[in-house]
Image (cartoon, rainbow, N blue to C red):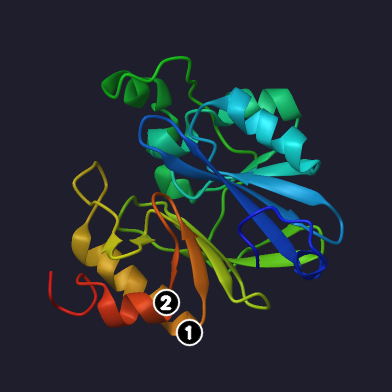
Amino acid sequence: MNTQPDHSSAEAKSPAQALIIPVTPFQQNCTLLWCTETNKAVVVDPGGDVLEILNAIRQAGVSVEQIWITHGHIDHVGGAADLRDELKVPIVGPHLADKFLLDHVVEGGRRFGMTNVRDFAPDRWLSEGDEVHLGKLSFKILHCPGHSPGSVVFFNDAMRFALVGDVLFNGSVGRTDLPGGDHATLIRSIEEKLLPLGDDVAFICGHGPGSNIGQERATNPFLNGLA
C-alpha cells in the first residue's frame, strides 16, 4: 500500500495507491484511494475544498466510483453532497448512528465558520461486518463508536491496511467531547476492534501522519496507561 503518487515500476506493483488531500481549516486528511489494477478510485471523507479534491482526481488520472465516509463530523463530510453532485457517484457510510450529524451538517458548519455545506443522507449506511469494494480490492467494515456513535473503519486484510478516520491517531485518539462521544467506548472500540488486527497493520487517520497498530500499542499514551 503506497500513500504517495509515484510512477516507478515498484510503485506500479502495489495493489493500491493513496493521495492525501488536506482540506478545511482543520487540515482533515481527505484520501483519494485507488486500485492500481483497475484505476477505480474512492474519495474518503471529503470534508470541504471540493475544487482541490476534483483537481487531485484529475491529476491522478483515476476514475472515482464512490465516496466513503468514516463518520459524520463536519470536517469529514462538509463537501460530500457537492462532490456527489459533481461526480455522480454514491456516498457510502458511515453507520446509521451518525444520522443525527448528517441531518445537521449546515448547523455544524455554522458553528465552525464553514459555509456552503449541505445536509445529506448517504446512499448506503454501513454496519459491522459489511464489505465495500474498490476495483479488485475488498474492505471489511468495523463499527468503532466513541469518537462519534457511527464511526466506522475500512480494513483491507490482504494489504494489512486500514482507514480509521478519527478513531485512532499517531500518538493519540479521537476527541470525545462532541455530541455522542464517549471516551470509554472509544478505548473499548480500539482495544476490541483495532488492536486485534495485528501490529503490522498500517493506517491512514483523519488528521496528521499515519502509523501502524504496533507503534500505537507500544507508544500511544492513551493505550498504554500513560495518558
**101 w.r.t. 13: above or below:** above
Location of the C terminus by quadrant is bottom left
Secondary structure under badge 1? loop
Task: Tell me, for residue 39, which label it has, or none.
Answer: none
User: Could you say where residue 97 lies in the image, as x and y percent from the top left?
Assistant: 41, 48
Q: Quadrant of residue 213?
A: bottom left
Marks 1 and 2, Cα distance to the nearest angstrom? 6 Å
Q: Residue at x 65, y 65 (%)?
A: 139
Between residue 143 and residue 19, name the one nearer to us: 19
Q: Relative to 19, is 108 on the left or the right?
A: left
Q: Relative to 96, is 188 on the left or the right?
A: left
Q: Relative to 154, is 187 on the left or the right?
A: left
**181 w.r.t. 22: above or below:** below
User: Could you say where residue 153 lies in the image, as x and y percent from the top left?
Assistant: 50, 61
Mark 1, residue position = 198
User: Could you say where residue 105 lies in the image, as x and y percent from the top left?
Assistant: 41, 27
Q: Relative to 187, is 9 on the left or the right?
A: right
Q: Residue at x 59, y 38 (%)?
A: 122
Between residue 210 and residue 125, name the one nearer to us: 210
Between residue 73 and residue 24, name the one nearer to us: 24
**69 w.r.t. 16: above or below:** above
Residue 11 visible in rendering = yes
Secondary structure under badge 2? helix
Q: Amino acid at mark 1?
A: Gly
Task: Tell me, for residue 213, which label it has, or none.
Answer: 2
Q: Amino acid at mark 2?
A: Ile
**Crowd around label 1: few <14 · some 14–19 · many ≥20 (10 Å):** few
Residue 89 visible in rendering = no
* Proximity of marks 1 and 2: CB atoms separated by less than 8 Å: yes
Q: Residue most toward the left? A: 226
Q: Residue at x 39, y 49 (%)?
A: 207
User: Could you say where residue 109 lies in the image, as x and y percent from the top left?
Assistant: 36, 23
